[in-house]
Image: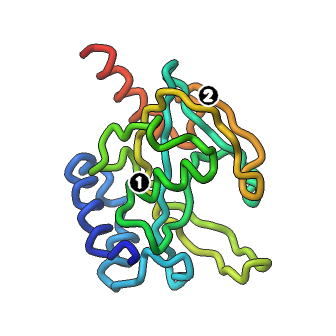
Amino acid sequence: MSIPNSHVRTVLDRYLDRFPEETEGTRLLRQVLEADHELSSRKEFRTGHATAGAVVLDQHDRALLIHHNALRTWLLPGGHLEPEDNDLQEAALRELSEETSLPPDEVTAVDALVPLDLDIHRIPENPAKGEPEHWHFDFRYLYRASGGEVSLQAEEVSDHAWRSPAELPSERLTDKVSQYLAATRTN
């Protein structure tokens, strides 16, 4: 069973309830949902498809980044949805475990219902895979890691690093992680 668009829509609605200032930036995703594209299919190229990612913080408040082989850049762990995924947060946790071997029982979702970030970005054409340029609608969930050794999935990932949240892939994400960390220090 794949993740239905109704689940994506529910998560998007929760996300926009928390981050209403991002409504305009999600217009393309809302249009694709309205057109009923099959967002859980990695073969949906009319516009693009949903993906799930993990923002993982360790005990020292450092964020986990991986070096992606195909895109040759540092990214958050994450990737495409699979037919066996039941929801977006579960997909993010599965991708994290697959790419880094961090055991799911050593990673805790800060909020399993609402992602910390929704990043909408273009993916370049990949002729080797027969994929045209398309969009990823990347639902990024925040996790705390209690330990565990990182062991990389070599066919997709060549390196990993625990970095300052200031080195995350976007200023908006850095700001959100900084706000989360500030709130946890005052509680």
Instruction: Tell me the residue at 55%/32% (across/down).
Output: 63
Provide the residue designation for mark 2: 163
Instruction: Tell me the residue at 55%/48% (across/down).
Output: 97
Q: Position of residue 73 (x, y in %)?
A: 72, 49
Q: Report whether 79 appears left or right of 140.
A: right
- In the rendered image of this protein, does residue 131 appear above or below residue 84? below
Instruction: Tell me the residue at 39%/35% (across/down).
Output: 176
Check disc 1 and give the amino acid type: Leu
- 1 or 2: tag closer to the N-terminus: 1
Q: Report whether 171 appears left or right of 37.
A: right
**In what element is the residue under mark 1?**
strand
Q: Quadrant of residue 118?
A: bottom left
Provide the residue designation for mark 1: 118
Residue farthest to the top, as pictured? 186
Quadrant in which the C terminus appears? top left
Quadrant in which the N terminus appears? bottom left
Q: Position of residue 26 (x, y in %)?
A: 36, 62
**In what element is the residue under mark 2?**
strand
Residue 13 disc label:
none
Report crowding for label 1: few under 14, some 14 to 19, many 20 or more residues within 10 A (C-alpha): many
- In the rendered image of this protein, does residue 181 appear above or below residue 48? above
Q: Position of residue 93 (x, y in %)?
A: 46, 50
Report crowding for label 2: few under 14, some 14 to 19, many 20 or more residues within 10 A (C-alpha): some
